[in-house]
Amino acid sequence: MALLEIENLHAGVDDKTILNGFDLTIEAGEVHAIMGPNGSGKSTLSYLLAGRDGYEAQNGSARFDGADLLDMEPEARAIAGLFLAFQYPLEIPGVTNMTFLRTALNAVRRGRGEDEMDPASFLRMVREKSRAMGVDDDMLKRPLNVGFSGGEKKRNEVLQMAVLEPRLAILDETDSGLDIDALQTVADGVNAMRNDARGMLVITHYQRLLDFIKPDFVHVMVRGRIVRSGGPELAEELERSGYGAYLGTQTGEAGEAGAAHA
């Protein structure tokens, strides 16, 4: 059984269709990357899978660990093990980073019928994981993302992923706005999470993140569907040539190149 299986998915927001017959299969242990021009539907895909309000499926299916993902409430998706790292993390004044992390973790544990983690055990765990992310104790005590630099916000997103340990992690342009040092730190955190039971979907515009993460599969997304799939060398081709060769591809004309990994 695939970890994530999306078939012929049509979806959009505000009555505007953005995904047009999207297909993708991710097995446990695999890292997939989606690249594409602005407006191709990459963020729409991530929001739809996470259950953001206003993003609605019109046709097709998405199954997560065999369950109908589109029929699940957002909190149920999180409890089942789905995680989304945002392109633009929100600032939440009045809620410390530490409080947010512990509340999120214990909410997921309760949803799974597990005991909550006591404060002392949580503190030891989060400090160990935060050191690896370059997140110091001062950042843990500050209001969530308030006054954080772009790099700090992105490192904090990966710290949240490390604390929650999801089955499927979706990273929506986590490399956006990062300098090379912050990019390396984020990539190291992502790579540390890779294992045979966890899948990852990395959405990015740039090859540079994939140089560090090295995905198993790379997909080109244009006009709401995948038009070509390949290995890491495909990202290098896109870096050299851009998306011009794919922008003329119309629905139904992609043929074999449009088949996602299955």
Image (tube, rainbow, N blue to C red):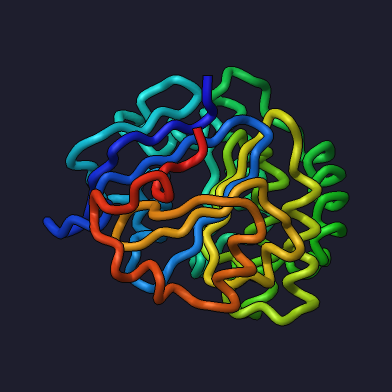
Q: Is residue 148 visible?
A: no
Residue at x 76%, y 35% (from the top left corner): 195
Residue at x 34%, y 60% (from the top left corner): 41
- Give x and y (percent) for residue 114: 64, 20
On screen, residue 206 versus residue 141, left or right, reads left
- Give x and y (percent) for residue 173: 54, 66
Residue at x 39%, y 52% (from the top left corner): 226
Judging depth in this view, the residue of 80 and 117 nearest the camera is 80
On screen, residue 158 versus residue 261, left or right, reads right
Judging depth in this view, the residue of 212 and 124 nearest the camera is 212
- Give x and y (percent) for residue 254: 33, 52
Q: In this view, which residue lies farthest toward the left? A: 15
Residue 219 against residue 136 in the figure, above or below: above
Judging depth in this view, the residue of 94 and 202 nearest the camera is 202
Q: Is residue 150 visible?
A: yes
Residue 71 against residue 122 in the figure, above or below: above
Residue 196 picture quarter: top right
- Give x and y (percent) for residue 155: 70, 65
On screen, residue 14 versus residue 112, left or right, reads left
Residue at x 61%, y 33% (from the top left corner): 167
**Mark count:** 0
Residue 138 against residue 15 in the figure, above or below: below
On screen, residue 109 versus residue 159, left or right, reads left
